[in-house]
Each structure stands twice: as C-alpha cells, then as structure tokens.
Image (cartoon, helix red, strand yellow):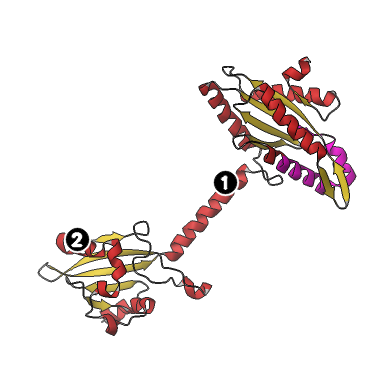
Amino acid sequence: MFDHLQLLNHLSIGIAVIDPEIKVIFWNQWLAEHSMISSEAITGRDLLSVYPGLQKVKFLNKIRAVFDSGQPVFFNNKVAANPFPFYSGRSYIEKKLIPMEQTVIISPMNDPAGNIEHALITIFDISDWISNQKNLLDSKQLLERLSHTDELTQIPNRRNIMDRLTEELRTHNRKNRPIAIAMLDIDHFKKTNDAYGHQCGDMVLHETAQIMSTLLRDYDAIGRYGGEEFLIILPETTSEQSWTICNRIRLTVQNHTYRYNGHKLQITVSIGIAAKKAGESILPDRLIAEADRYLYVAKESGRNRTENKQSTMI
C-alpha cells in the first residue's frame, strides 16, 4: 500500500489542507520548498496570518464559499496571477527571482457522513505555460508583421498597401472626403545597380523608403509596390495638397546624399499623382492606373518631376 502523505509530498504541485478556521492541517513538500516554510512550522497556524496578502484577493470569502456551498472555487492568472508570494522554478535557471504565475483551486473535503470537514488547496505553477503562450503570441505577431512588411525597406509590402488602399477608398466613398495616391519610381535605378552592385541598390531603396516615411503625415501610408516603385496613399487630401506633399518628397530625395563604400550618390525620383474629389467614386486599380499614367508623363518629361492632372494642363 502507498503512504498517501508520502505520495502527496512527491507531487509537483502545492497541496494544503485547512480547517474551517483557516488553520493549516497539511502542507506538502512542494509548498515547503516554494514557501521556505516547513510543514512543522506552519501546521496549526492561521493561513491568513502567515500570508496576510491573501486578503487582497478576498481569499477568506472564497474559503467561506467552499464551506457554505460545497462547491470548489478557483483563482486563475487573470483574477490573481500570484495569490501566494512564491517564485517560479524558472528563477533557478535564470538566476533571478521570477514571481510564480498560479492557478489555485480550493475544493471541499467531506467526512464519511458527507459533511464538509476541510478544504483542499491545490496550487499549480503555470509560469512556464504563461511564458510559452506569450512566446507563441509574440511569434504570431512577428509572423503577421513579417507577412505585411517588405523585408528590405521595412515598410508595408504590396499586399498590405493594397489592402490599405481598398480600406481608404471605402472611407472616401462613405464619408464623402477627397483622396489622393501617388506612384513614385526611383530614376535610373538599373544604372545604379549596374554601377555599384545590388547591395548599393538595396541601400538606396531602404534609405528612400525611410526618407518618404519621415515626410508623410501620421494618417498617410506608404508601401513598396514592386521593384523600385512605391505607392503613397494620402487620405483627405486634395489634388493641390497632394502635389505639395509629393514634390517635397521629390526635392528632399534630390537634395539627399546617399553614401555607399566611399561613393556619394545623388538619386532622383519621378512621381505621378491621381486625386479624387469628395463624391467621386473609383476602384483601386483604376486609381493606380491613373497615377501610373502621370508617372509615365513625369518620366517622359525628363524625370525628377512631380506630375498630376493640373500640372499636365499647364
């Protein structure tokens, strides 16, 4: 036959038994190790006098509820992450004190006649589980971010920026506000790659993306559309306003000195803008096609230009 007390002392969970006066009747080895209070030292003592902090989580009310109703109650980590001031076993590995995340269950213990004689307190260390869940969540968020971000430029990728455009056009149509987009292309990008190598080209793409990002407003959006092309979304922006914003980007790039392996490079961009007034409805593909048309005009007119409907009419 097994010695039941010896068995309870070998469990990797905390087991305590208390009477209706909240006095400790049993305190297993796991609890002794994590509390640093031996079974002999705590047996017969009021648990709340040993751990007065339990009052903050209404521990006494929970105990009374068990004795009154005969139903178990519990604390999960959302209600009280650390009801007993123990430290996780991970503390030994990481060599620093880490509060133990716990699930605590208080269950009634009946005598042979069916009367509730004691309450059983079971304490589970769920610190590793919580840590693993956090790591999984962090990994999920990282994967989601990576799936929406262009790895080279660290701005939204094509899929992400197109989703944003669809969303912004819905808002444009629903709220009757103006909107503009711009297609931006780095001039003579192939020549840069051929002259200095693809790593230089990567640097130019990344640095240009960062320059544009710093010049846009909080509610604007930019994404890498493909190759050396970028799509800029300018919500609630008129044709005139969009030209001012985009031309500032063009001039900033033109005046910026790119540096690679001791070389100084001057880079320019061409920009085509499509803008819609409040009340004008249009599909994403048609709006992009219109911006592309003005981008073509900018390139055919000598590059390093910002073009839209108004500029081509001058």
C-alpha gap between disc 2 and disc 1: 45 Å
Where on the picture, by quarter, is residue 280?
top right
> Helix, strand or loop at disc 2?
helix
Relative depth, front residue between 51 and 113: 51
* Identity of the residue furthest to the top in this view: 313
Question: Is residue 286 visible in the rendered structure shown here?
Answer: no
- The quadrant of the rendering that contains the C terminus is top right
Apparent side of residue 20 relative to residue 4 in the rendered image (left or right):
left
Residue at 77% over, 33% down = 250
Q: Is 234 drawn above or below residue 313 in the view shown?
A: below
Picture coordinates of residue 268 (x, y %)?
Answer: 82, 35
Q: Which residue is depicted at the point 75% across and 30% down? A: 247
The residue range painted magenta reads 183-211
Question: Looking at the picture, does residue 231 appear above or below residue 264?
Answer: above
Q: Residue 202: which disc?
A: none
Q: Amino acid at mark 2?
A: Ala
Residue 246 shows up from this direction: yes
Question: Is 185 inside the magenta-drawn segment?
Answer: yes
Query: As drawn, is 168 to the left or to the right of 110?
Result: right
- Identity, as a three-letter code, of the amino acid under mark 1: Glu
Position of 2 compared to 314: left or right?
Answer: left
Circle 1 residue = 144
Residue drawn at (67%, 32%) of the image: 232
Q: Disc 2 marks which residue?
A: 65
Q: Residue 218 in the image: x percent, y percent? A: 60, 38
